[in-house]
Amino acid sequence: MLSRRDYLKYSALAGAACAFPASLLRALEAGDIIKRAIPVTGEELPVVGLGSSATFRTVAQSDDVTALRGVLQTLVENGGTVFDTAPGYGASEEVAGQIVQDLGLQEKVFWATKVNVAPRGGGSADPAAARAQIDRSFEYIGKDPIDLIQVHNLGDVPTQMGILKDLKEEGRVRYIGVTSTSSSRYPDLEQVMRDESVDFIGVDYAVDNRESAESVLPLAQELGIGVLAYVPFGRTRLWARVRGLEVPDWAQEFGADTWGKFFIKYVISHPAITCVTPATSKPENMLDNIGAAFGDLPDEATRRRMAEFVDALPSA
Ligand SMILES: NC(=O)c1ccc[n+]([C@@H]2O[C@H](COP(=O)([O-])OP(=O)(O)OC[C@H]3O[C@@H](n4cnc5c(N)ncnc54)[C@H](OP(=O)(O)O)[C@@H]3O)[C@@H](O)[C@H]2O)c1
């Protein structure tokens, strides 16, 4: 794992490569970044953030993490705040925490992490281990309270949600929630949404993966639960489906001039979504993704057209 000293060495080398003057231009041209209210408090969040599994995680584990500094700077310089991470994402949380602290951005980043020490496939979580895992998150980000902690993948919810509730009561975490990106577990997710006072859920949603919109997203709206939308590109799936294809002309009408914006604008135009957190390891892709949070969004008829367009593409 990368030490803080190593990180500082790498980040010194990054130097001027991290300046993105295009960011200000974009904001001036397209107006303010679109925000959504967290239902339970009304606090507004920019509708596009950053995730940290996939390629972000791979780079975080490598010897050179300078690109991630550019990614996090690009997020914040363009008005984004939400960073979704987890102790389960290798070095992502530690490295991002070092970068954010180094840049003095702790208060500008909405830090959404997770807890899970339950065995894979079910079983009990050791409460002491769960608390120790959360203590490490506090250490990495250097921010207290942490903005959001969710029980990752529905792991031993009674034990781990109990710990999160205690932390919330103590004022050490502002919001609590639970995540699942497995449709076979949506019924369990919905049960937790009904039984526990969760502020957020994290769930998968993409233009070619719309199952969560059948019952999970409407339930979140009904119960006033915020939603972090995960895996908006299906990781590599959607990229494979559109390889070699131009974005259709009609998508320019709502500002989708890249596939990244097309996929993200579909997700954030669902009214249940509070914020989408695509992962990237590249500052230029972060700029592309956050660009989807400016300008117009597709209406209902256009959303149907987008889904039909993607459904007609060959499977990846
Ligand atoms: N159960 C859970 O709690 C759970 C489960 C899954 C995901 N999540 C969260 O949701 C986040 C997003 O999901 P994900 O990381 O699985 O997949 P994703 O965001 O759907 O896809 C990430 C992939 O898209 C590429 N990409 C990103 N922006 C791009 C752009 N503008 N143009 C071209 N390629 C682009 C990235 O590569 P480059 O590096 O080349 O940009 C990477 O390969 C995760 O990182 C995590 O924070 C949570």
Image (cartoon, grey):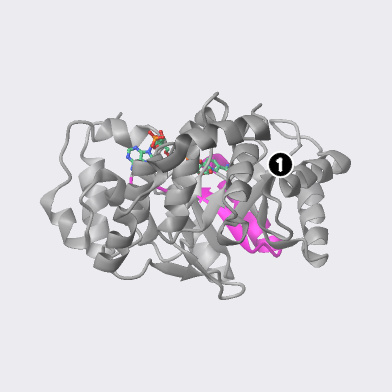
Position of residue 238 measured from the top left corner of the image (x, y, whole percent): 32, 37
Q: Nearer the viewer, residue 168 or 2?
A: 2
Q: Nearer the viewer, residue 253 or 94?
A: 94
| Vertical order, 300 against 57 (above or below) | below
Residue at the image point whose x is 47% and y is 32% from the top: 55
**Disc 1 target residue:** 155
Residue at the image point whose x is 43% and y is 57% from the top: 77
Q: Quadrant of ligand 1?
A: top left
Residue at the image point whose x is 23% and y is 46% from the top: 258
Position of residue 269 measured from the top left corner of the image (x, y, whole percent): 35, 62
Q: Is residue 146 magenta?
A: no
Position of residue 282 measured from the top left corner of the image (x, y, whole percent): 40, 38
Outermost residue on the right side: it is: 128
Is the CB–ligand 1 distance for label 1 below 8 Å? no
Q: Is residue 151 left or right of residue 314?
A: right
Q: Is residue 184 magenta?
A: yes
Q: Is residue 204 left or right of residue 61?
A: left
Q: Is residue 299 left or right of residue 69?
A: left
Residue 214 appears in the figure: no
| Vertical order, 84 against 43 (above or below) | above
| Vertical order, 246 against 228 (above or below) | above
Outermost residue on the bottom side: it is: 42
User: Magenta residues, as a range?
Assistant: 181-207
- The picture quadrant where one finds residue 15 is top left
Image quadrant for the C terminus?
A: top left
- The picture quadrant where one finds residue 34 is bottom left
Residue density around tag 1, few if under 14, some if 14–19, many if 20 or more, within 10 Å: many
Q: How many marks?
A: 1
Secondary structure state at the residue bearing disc 1: loop
